[in-house]
Image: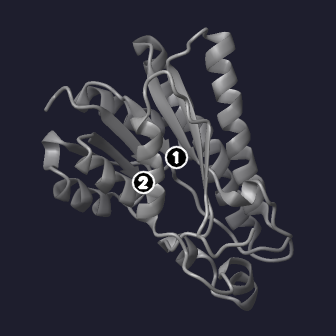
Amino acid sequence: MADDPVLLITGASSGIGEATARRAARAGYRLALGARREDRLVELAAELGGEERALAHGCDVTEWEQVRAFADAAIERLGRIDAVLANAGHGAARGFTEDSPERWRSMILTNVYGLALTIRAILPHMLARGDGHMLLTSSVTARRLLPGSLYSATKWAAGAIGEALRQEIRTMHKNEAIRVTVIEPGMVETPFFEEIEESETAARAYTPAEGRPLAPEDVAEAVLYALRQPAHVDVSEILIRPASQSH
């Protein structure tokens, strides 16, 4: 239906983003799906209801014009944006003598700058509406920094951005209806880790010693939990780990 709420997701082509899209669709959300892999988005949008229910839009979150165009397309096609999951991100091998400076740069731009651009593109719309929900994907490594992990630093920044955004909304804009939630998953079994260079160092950095990791669907349920809360309840942070993860 045209009055069903709209959830915009970056990094929606796989992993947590895709799982959240599927879970939100079952909960009655219409979807704006953004990622660099537009071909996969088109397939996913078709599965989740087609043009009436889901918009697929290629978007590199490190490019301002692309992020702005994605937000504008979502508002034009679906009428509004009720909630955002700013989820696009990637990692790098641990160790400041590992991986390449080029990958570091891409990771920082995606995980930090891209997050800020997503907020910049959508916050004015939510302020004009008077309500909305911003959800930002961080990581357990933002709370427990890993040795040699520049990735941890980017996810610490994501948490800082979330708190800075919440304070801006409350104090600078005098708005109590726009909510902000930082999602902090532990080890998740997603294609995210397949993108890290296959090396002994990378394996030591990212492969859990034992136990079962979270599934993307587990994190999607945490996102939906935050979205389902009454309007006066703002779930500021959700830290979700596998039961087997000790840190």
Q: Which residue shows up at 36% across the image and 29% down it?
A: 81
Residue type at mark 2 is Glu
Compared to 111, does 132 lie above or below?
Answer: above
Q: Which residue shows up at 66% across the image and 59% down it?
A: 107
Instruction: Please say if the residues under marks 1 and 2 sit with CB atoms less than 8 Å apart.
Output: no
Image x and y of residue 5, in percent? 28, 31
Foreground: 122 or 160? 160
Image x and y of residue 17, in percent? 42, 56
For the residue carrying disc 2, how many other residues have a C-alpha within 10 Å: few (<14), some (14-19), or many (20+)?
Answer: some
Compared to 168, does 192 lie above or below?
Answer: below
Residue tagged 2: 221
Q: Which residue shows up at 73% across the image and 72% down it?
A: 246
Q: Quadrant of residue 140?
A: bottom right
Q: What coloring was used for the rendering? A: one colour
Q: Is 194 placed left or right of 36 in the picture?
A: right
For the residue carrying disc 1, how many other residues have a C-alpha within 10 Å: few (<14), some (14-19), or many (20+)?
Answer: many
Compared to 3, does 181 lie above or below?
Answer: below
Q: Which mark is residue 61?
A: 1
